[in-house]
């Protein structure tokens, strides 16, 4: 259907709901313990509980599975593995060939080998541990540099190149180089992966899945079971956090639950214990970055080469796209005329890494920020000045190395504002004075900008659908392809719909995401949730509204332009009727009060072969100043203050956006400070719970935490109400904390010496960097 | 003998027949289907499973947060259990209302546990500054919000009244007096009331699980490890619950919780109090006992190094009588102690500070709150005219057992604490201890930091600010 819909800027739309800081739609239910997650749903009679059998070794050949001890436990319903899959044993999200259940090859510790089901959770879990695996162990590859040395990759390497980087570096006045190791990160969503599969008649399957990507769950369950997609429905009301961890790998859990349900004809719930979740599902990719930069005397980057070794783990999963985003964010805010960025997807015998908020962007931005700092440090120049002379702009250029022009540059605006509000000058002086008098506790200060590209790098994913019904009492039902993982997407999209109809937000029913209602959706990811689904919902609501306006115009006998929707009523001059009355009237006239609409992001294109194009609809901008204290005897650190300014365009909901900024910053800070994944020499992940894997706690949040949203600066692109995406960009502002730690460490070195600090800046890594400086100082 | 567990659930008396080793979390979710309480980790570290437990003490009911994922149903016999659903009543509890209004939840999964912890703080009537709020939240992880809106909501509520916990009246507790034994569904839970009864039981059933708080054992329970068919709980043993004071010592029965220990040692040893707040959240401190912490003999336990440096003596009891020993002699090898199968830890005595004594304990970990030590170093010196007369230095995380380092003490005794003696002491620490490498830190890091703590101690005594958290 071809509907002529107004754009969100149309004058008939007043902004009485959008743009207001409205609480999360589930807030009252959250605090009362009444919000229903999948494990809280009433269980159907006969429900089975399942648990995974995971590989205890990192690399080997599976010779046999002996389930007799497990099957001997009372109430165990069965054990299923690769050979039991009726369809295709494959859950590869991008590239086929990623078996859900290991076949012959065991390629990481925690590899899913089989699923066991029993009448209760405890029995299933105990039984899973009784399954005997006959595995011929092989030596594992655990190190990305070892994999790189052997050219062992899960995907072809990617290169973003512009100009002649090698030549520019060779001809530069100064050449610097370095190597940065950055750790991965576990998502640590509070709700672990879960799925509840309910078999229907004729082989149909309903799967409640804690997934950011219901369509992918639907399609993979269908493939695994040998069904058409139309036989499978996936539903998601809410997740207890996602952060990218439930983007592609929820298919593993949902697929296994559906297999048990299909095999037994009984509902099956599969909930991962925290340790199984952490051992069995992927994380943020840890990287090694090797770089070489040529600069002039001021620190202007003339040429830059960066080679990334990303830990893909055993399989590609989303690694290709993660690396693409790293390569398209290595410039961050800086014009680099001659660039060559290469990314290798290193194959290791560790769990397949996956999406995580920022999706490769954080690794690129951390790298370039470390490079800029190292340049400034070694040239003895102010890092902020070195940053500024490299910013995109009139004096430098506006073309990114991947061929997209930076057209909406707010770098100077955000960084000047944050430097001023953070009292940079005064505090820089004060901190330098403190350090001169304090041999043990050092303080550090750093500012950094973030420019982040919004859209999925893969153009085809940038589409969404929404379904809106108006019922005869004037209540509205809303459904769209986006999922709610806590980020407030549902309330934002509901605000859009309420805004269109000018009704109370309470009149808009927020419903579970369901593949049967809105099909073929993209993952709720890449910060695009509200951009895509908000726009689709806007179109659906606007189409219904246009038809209703026609009915109203006939009723009042006025021109359509004179019909005004306001405060739950529909007005024509001094006369008005309620929105519900108009709905009834429209029904009586046999006018359609339902609409399914679609939105595809305009302007974007990407050539994966040349690695050039316009992958991003627009950029967001942010900046942060962080101050830390570092104990040079122990390596302990603390962030004392953070000042943040983030561009969100004209926000749909500034309260929700503020929460996203704060949460993302703390998560980014955690990635770079206390969160450390640790594998032993045999490739076993030993940090598989909160007792060993430490995410930030409330006391780790800087005691002075000043977060501001850039004053209403509408997106120059036509996004939903000119808002900007918010989910991921502020995570990278956490890099400021790492830079401040680096600054504090640098204070103990002589001028011109750049500390070698790995990420995360755990006390141990900090102390190692300090010790290295002291040793090199001593040698000098 | 009882065949059921009697307690109050959100004010209503319950008489429940369930295996006493069922976790409280499992029962809540599968029994009455109170699903507001969540499983986030099943190791007592994320707080999503937090509930409030009420006990009568000095004629009033005190509520404190606890982790229901690692707590058995037997342990709530005779107590009042309040869940997030129970807090709501007719209207939202003030902390619930404040959090709902203040954007304090995003995904909402951690939220019920956070509500519980803050309701516990609000009801405690104690200090409610930011420090206390962070203390109350130390056992709760939130991955979404960055905590600011949670802390802010807490500040609003702590200033106001009306934040009481709905529950039973004091008198009603008489109806749920804990049973000496609970037998249900093939499992037995003993709750002896006297030390004699405990020793008799221990003698008869040396293989039974001796439960002294359960913050360590409960982690195994939640992972379905071990045989919990027969449990002996120390929680109601009168002598083990005693707290005594003499002019020279504080004494604690082994079943005294860390929360109770904290209140008593804080005025005497502020540094120890800081450590106690850090080594376990409110939830853990209100469950874990001082005897359990020693008896579990973890090489990374934080209590023992501090207690060894303080010169603590412990008393072990069995039917054959009692024997006392310095705590450092109790630990033999990795998880091996002097404790015989029929013995229990009865009590310990902490000397009060002597004239000229300085005590400091430093914990190094990846996160400040609710983390396990990479290294924990405790230093105690008694000085006269600037000269060290005696010293006790002990470390955790540096060996298979909590370890006293006499060589490092010797480097200080008879001398002043200055750069030179500190260097000697640090060198002795490095030489005497051979730590392992693991996820908390490499052997090299541990050695370096342990030695550096001697330097921190020197600077600390000289009045410098030595910890980043003090800024």
Image (tube, helix red, strand yellow):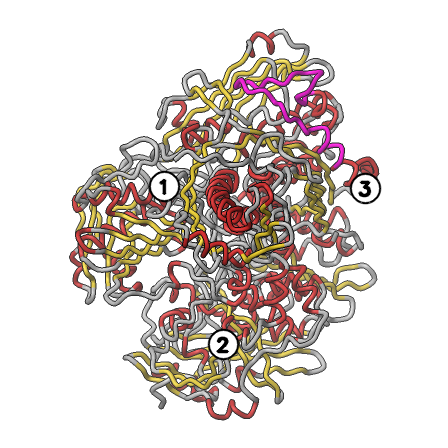
**A66 vs A361: above or below:** below
Mark 1 crowdedness (10 Å alpha carbons): few <14, some 14-19, many ≥20: some
A436 or B59: which is nearer to us?
B59
Mark 3 crowdedness (10 Å alpha carbons): few <14, some 14-19, many ≥20: some
Would you identify the image quadrant in which residue A138 lies? Answer: top left
B54 or A453: which is nearer to us?
A453
Mark 2 crowdedness (10 Å alpha carbons): few <14, some 14-19, many ≥20: many
Q: Residue at x 53, y 57 (%)?
A: A25
Q: Is residue A24 left or right of residue A509?
A: right
> Which residue matches tag 2?
B345
Q: Residue at x 31, y 52 (%)?
A: A207
Q: Do marks 1 and 2 share a subunit?
A: no
**A720 vs B14: above or below:** above
| Residue A522, x across and y down, in percent | 40, 38
Question: Which mark lies nearer to you, 3 or 1?
Answer: 3
Would you identify the image quadrant in which residue A770 lies? Answer: top right
Q: Is residue A186 left or right of residue A566?
A: left
* The magenta segment: A390-417
Question: Which mark lies nearer to you, 1 or 2?
Answer: 1
Residue furthest toward the front?
A557
**B98 vs A576: above or below:** below
Chain letter behind tag 2:
B
| Residue B411 makes an appearance in the image | yes
| Residue B430 makes an appearance in the image | no
Rounded to the nearest angstrom, the CA distance separating label 3 from label 1 is 45 Å
Residue A434: numbered disc = 3
The answer to if A408 sits in the magenta stretch is yes
Q: Are marks 1 and 2 in contact (CB under 8 Å)?
A: no
SS at badge 3 = helix
């Amino acid at each position: 259907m071809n509907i002529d819909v107004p754009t969100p800027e149309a004058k008939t739309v007043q902004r009485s709901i959008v743009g207001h800081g409205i609480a999360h739609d589930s807030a009252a239910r959250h605090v009362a313990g009444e919000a229903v997650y999948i494990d809280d749903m009433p269980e159907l009679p006969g429900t089975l509980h399942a648990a995974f059998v995971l590989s205890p070794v990192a690399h080997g050949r599976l010779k046999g599975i002996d389930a007799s001890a497990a099957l001997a436990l009372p109430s165990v319903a069965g054990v299923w593995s690769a050979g039991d899959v009726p369809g295709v044993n494959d859950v590869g999200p991008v590239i086929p060939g990623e078996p859900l259940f290991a076949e012959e090859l065991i390629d990481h510790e925690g590899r899913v080998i089989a699923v066991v089901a029993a009448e209760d959770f405890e029995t299933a879990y105990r039984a899973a541990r009784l399954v005997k695996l006959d595995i011929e162990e092989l030596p594992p590859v655990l190190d990305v540099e070892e994999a790189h040395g052997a050219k062992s990759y899960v995907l072809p390497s990617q290169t973003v190149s512009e100009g002649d980087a090698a030549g520019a570096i060779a001809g530069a006045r100064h050449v610097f180089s370095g190597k940065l190791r950055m750790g991965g990160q576990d998502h640590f969503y509070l709700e672990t992966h879960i799925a509840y599969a309910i078999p229907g008649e004729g082989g149909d399957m309903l799967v409640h899945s804690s997934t950011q990507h219901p369509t992918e769950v639907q399609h993979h369950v269908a493939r695994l079971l040998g069904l058409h997609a139309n036989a499978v429905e996936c539903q998601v009301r809410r997740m207890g956090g996602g952060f990218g961890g439930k983007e592609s790998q929820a298919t593993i859990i949902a697929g296994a639950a559906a297999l048990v349900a299909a095999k037994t004809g009984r509902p099956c719930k599969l909930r991962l214990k925290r340790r199984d979740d952490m051992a069995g599902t992927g994380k943020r990719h840890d990287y090694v970055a090797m770089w070489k930069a040529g600069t002039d005397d001021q620190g202007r980057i003339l040429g830059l080469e960066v080679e990334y070794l990303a830990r893909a783990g055993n399989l590609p999963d989303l690694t290709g796209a993660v690396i693409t985003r790293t390569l398209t964010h290595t410039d961050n805010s800086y014009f680099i005329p001659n660039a060559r960025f290469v990314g290798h997807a290193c194959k290791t015998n560790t769990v397949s890494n996956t999406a995580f908020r920022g999706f490769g962007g954080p690794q690129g931005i951390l790298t370039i920020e470390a490079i800029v700092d190292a340049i400034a440090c070694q040239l003895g120049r102010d890092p902020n000045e070195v940053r500024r002379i490299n910013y995109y702009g009139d004096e430098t250029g506006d073309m990114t190395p991947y061929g997209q022009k930076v057209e909406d540059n707010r770098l100077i605006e955000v960084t000047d504002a944050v430097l001023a509000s953070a009292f940079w000058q005064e505090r820089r002086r004060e901190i330098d004075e403190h350090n001169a008098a304090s041999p043990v506790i050092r303080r550090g200060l750093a500012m950094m900008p973030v420019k982040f590209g919004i859209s999925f790098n893969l153009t085809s994913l940038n589409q969404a659908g929404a379904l809106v019904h108006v019922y005869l009492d004037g209540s509205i039902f809303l459904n769209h392809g986006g999922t709610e993982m806590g980020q407030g997407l549902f309330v934002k999209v509901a605000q859009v719909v309420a805004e269109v109809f000018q009704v109370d937000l309470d009149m808009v029913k927020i419903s579970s995401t369901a593949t049967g209602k809105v099909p073929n959706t993209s993952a709720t990811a890449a910060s695009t949730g509200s951009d895509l689904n908000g726009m689709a919902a806007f179109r659906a609501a606007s189409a219904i509204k246009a038809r209703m306006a026609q009915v109203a115009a006939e009723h009042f006998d006025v021109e359509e332009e004179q019909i005004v929707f306001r405060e739950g009523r529909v007005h024509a001059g001094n006369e008005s009727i309620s929105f519900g009355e108009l709905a009834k009237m429209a029904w009586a006239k046999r006018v359609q009060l339902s609409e399914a609409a679609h939105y595809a992001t305009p302007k974007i294109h990407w050539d994966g072969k040349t690695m050039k194009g316009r992958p991003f609809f627009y950029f967001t901008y942010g900046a942060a100043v962080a101050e830390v204290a570092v104990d040079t005897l122990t390596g302990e650190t603390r962030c004392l203050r953070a000042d943040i300014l983030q561009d969100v365009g004209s926000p749909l909901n500034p309260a929700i956006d503020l929460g996203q900024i704060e949460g993302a910053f703390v998560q980014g800070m955690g990635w770079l400070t206390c969160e450390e994944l640790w594998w032993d020499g045999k490739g076993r992940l030993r940090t598989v719970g909160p007792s060993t894997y430490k995410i930030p706690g409330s006391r780790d949040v800087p005691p002075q935490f000043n977060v501001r949203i850039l004053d209403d600066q509408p997106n120059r692109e036509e996004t939903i109400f000119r808002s900007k995406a918010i989910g991921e960009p502020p995570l990278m502002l956490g890099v400021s904390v790492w830079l401040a730690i680096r600054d504090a460490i640098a204070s103990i070195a002589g001028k011109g010496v750049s500390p070698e600090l790995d990420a995360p800046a755990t006390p141990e890594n900090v102390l190692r960097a300090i010790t290295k400086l002291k040793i090199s100082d001593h040698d000098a | 003998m009882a065949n059921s567990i009697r307690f109050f659930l959100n004010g209503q008396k319950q008489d429940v027949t369930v295996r006493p080793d069922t976790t409280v979390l499992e029962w809540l979710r599968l029994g009455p289907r109170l699903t507001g309480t969540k499983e986030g980790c099943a190791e007592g570290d994320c707080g999503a499973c937090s509930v409030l437990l009420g006990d009568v003490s000095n004629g009033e009911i005190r509520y404190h947060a606890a982790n229901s994922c690692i707590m058995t149903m037997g342990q709530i016999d005779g107590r009042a259990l309040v869940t997030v659903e129970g807090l709501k009543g007719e209207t939202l509890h003030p902390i619930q209302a404040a959090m709902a209004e203040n954007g304090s939840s995003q995904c909402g999964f951690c939220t019920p546990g956070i509500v519980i912890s803050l309701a516990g703080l609000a009801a405690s009537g104690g200090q409610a500054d930011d420090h206390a709020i962070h203390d109350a939240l130390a056992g709760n992880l939130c991955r979404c919000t960055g905590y600011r809106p949670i802390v802010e909501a807490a500040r609003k509520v702590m200033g106001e009244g009306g934040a009481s916990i709905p529950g039973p009246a004091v008198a009603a507790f008489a109806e749920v007096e804990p049973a000496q034994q609970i037998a249900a569904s093939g499992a037995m839970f003993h709750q002896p009331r006297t030390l004699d009864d405990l020793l008799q039981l221990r003698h008869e059933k040396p293989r039974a699980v001796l439960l002294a708080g359960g913050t360590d054992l409960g982690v195994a329970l939640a992972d379905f490890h071990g045989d919990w068919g027969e449990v002996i709980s120390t929680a109601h043993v009168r002598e083990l619950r005693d707290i005594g004071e003499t002019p020279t010592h504080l004494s604690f029965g082994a079943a005294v919780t860390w929360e109770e220990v904290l209140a008593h040692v804080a005025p005497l040893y502020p540094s120890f109090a800081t450590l106690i707040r850090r080594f376990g959240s409110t939830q853990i401190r209100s469950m874990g006992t001082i005897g359990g912490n020693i008896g579990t003999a973890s090489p990374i336990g934080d209590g023992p190094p501090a207690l060894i440096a303080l010169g603590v003596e412990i008393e072990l009891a069995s039917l054959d009588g009692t024997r006392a020993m310095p705590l450092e002699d109790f630990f033999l090898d990795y998880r091996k102690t002097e404790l015989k199968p029929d013995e229990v830890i009865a009590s310990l005595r902490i000397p009060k500070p002597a004239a000229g004594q300085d005590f400091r304990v430093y914990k190094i970990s990846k996160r400040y709150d609710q983390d396990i030590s990479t290294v924990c170093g405790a230093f105690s010196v008694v000085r006269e005219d600037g000269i060290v007369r005696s010293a006790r230095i002990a470390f955790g995380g540096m060996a298979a057992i909590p370890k006293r380092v006499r060589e490092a003490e010797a480097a200080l005794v008879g001398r002043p604490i200055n750069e030179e003696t500190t260097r000697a002491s640090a060198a002795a620490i490095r030489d005497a201890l051979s730590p392992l490498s693991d996820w908390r830190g490499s052997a090299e890091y541990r050695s370096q930091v342990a030695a550096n703590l001697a330097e921190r101690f020197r600077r600390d005594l000289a009045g410098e600010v030595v910890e980043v958290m003090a800024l």
